[in-house]
Amino acid sequence: MLITESRRHENLMGIAWMIASMAAFAIEDAFLKIVTKQVPVGQVLMMFGLGGLCVFAILARRAKAHLFQPQVFTRSMLFRAVFEFFGRLFYILAIALTPMSSATAILQAAPLFVALGARIFLNEKVDAKTWLAIWVGLLGVLIILRPSADDFSALSLLALIGTLGFVGRDLFTRAAPPVLTKEVLGFYGFTTTVIAGACFALWDGKGFVALQTMQVLMLVLALTAGVFAYTALMTAMRTGSIAAVTPYRYTRLLFGISIGVVAFDEQLDAPMLLGCAVVIGAGLFIGWQNQRRQPAQ
């Protein structure tokens, strides 16, 4: 099938938006990691979530999307909120307590878990080659985690639990009523973040601290990066073809590792790099398989 010049341009623009989105997500993680060194995680989550829900409430108003409608209270939205709760909470704990590079690396396994979850929860068909790629990718996750190594830290499981939370959120987003726009979903996603922060703050018992100007600035920058990343991601998916732009999600790993090494003096080793290569290779193969099954247009 020949690709027209117009379509090629759209794909290039979509790829550019995807790369920009992944860079912004990595920057968001970096700012949150800095803030959580000085401010309790529960407080950070609550303030970050409050800022995000305000932004998406404004965006929903501009788009004339109703925030309160019966479809919000469906079972799929309830499950989405539960998974969002655990995804947001455990991933920010991973960012705060473990190297950013390893947390970002484990997050790259999300497409593998989405493929697995789609088979289990949504009854989507998975062929033998895709099953093999899923298991190979999960092996890559184990290489990154190294559960049998002397330097294994149980804290590494925080990123894995956070990733599983995001996977469940993405799966139930696909099952959410189509009438709920991205602005509405964003509003309730950040509302869940506030609830997660409040629950963790009660459990943690560290209370709240008065924020200094620099800490407020870091939170604002994290929120700005996060909103831009979400918007750029939606733009990428709507501009280029899914097959063209989706593989560039993995550039988040390059940005995350680079920031971890440069800003936080994190060290990489051979098992980490090997595990990343296995996970990304398996994810790209699954994406390629899915594209082959789609009819030509």
Image (spheres, helix red, strand yellow):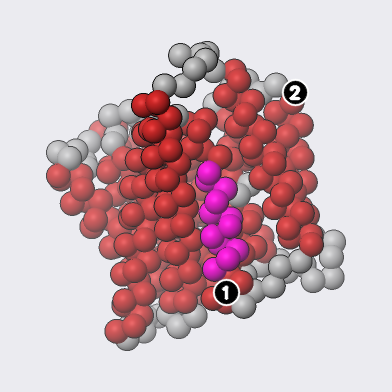
Q: Which residue is mark 1?
A: 262
Q: Which residues are magenta?
A: 248-259
Return the disc, 2 or 1, that comes first in the chain's sequence.
2
In percent of the image, x 64 and y 74: which residue is there?
266
Lateral position of residue 137 relative to residue 194, left or right: right
Magenta stretch: includes residue 252: yes
Determine which quarter of the picture holds residue 195.
bottom left
Residue 194 visible in the snapshot:
no
Q: Which residue is mark 2?
A: 128
Question: Label 2's element?
Answer: helix
Q: Residues within 10 Å of mark 2 (few under 14, many from 20)?
A: few
Question: Label 1's element?
Answer: helix
Question: Residue 249 in the image: x percent, y percent?
Answer: 52, 45
Question: Residue 243 in the image: x percent, y percent?
Answer: 52, 30
In percent of the image, x 42 and y 58: which residue is there?
24
Choose mark 2 or mark 1, whichever is in front: 1
Magenta stretch: includes residue 54: no
* Kind of residue sitting beneath label 2: Ala
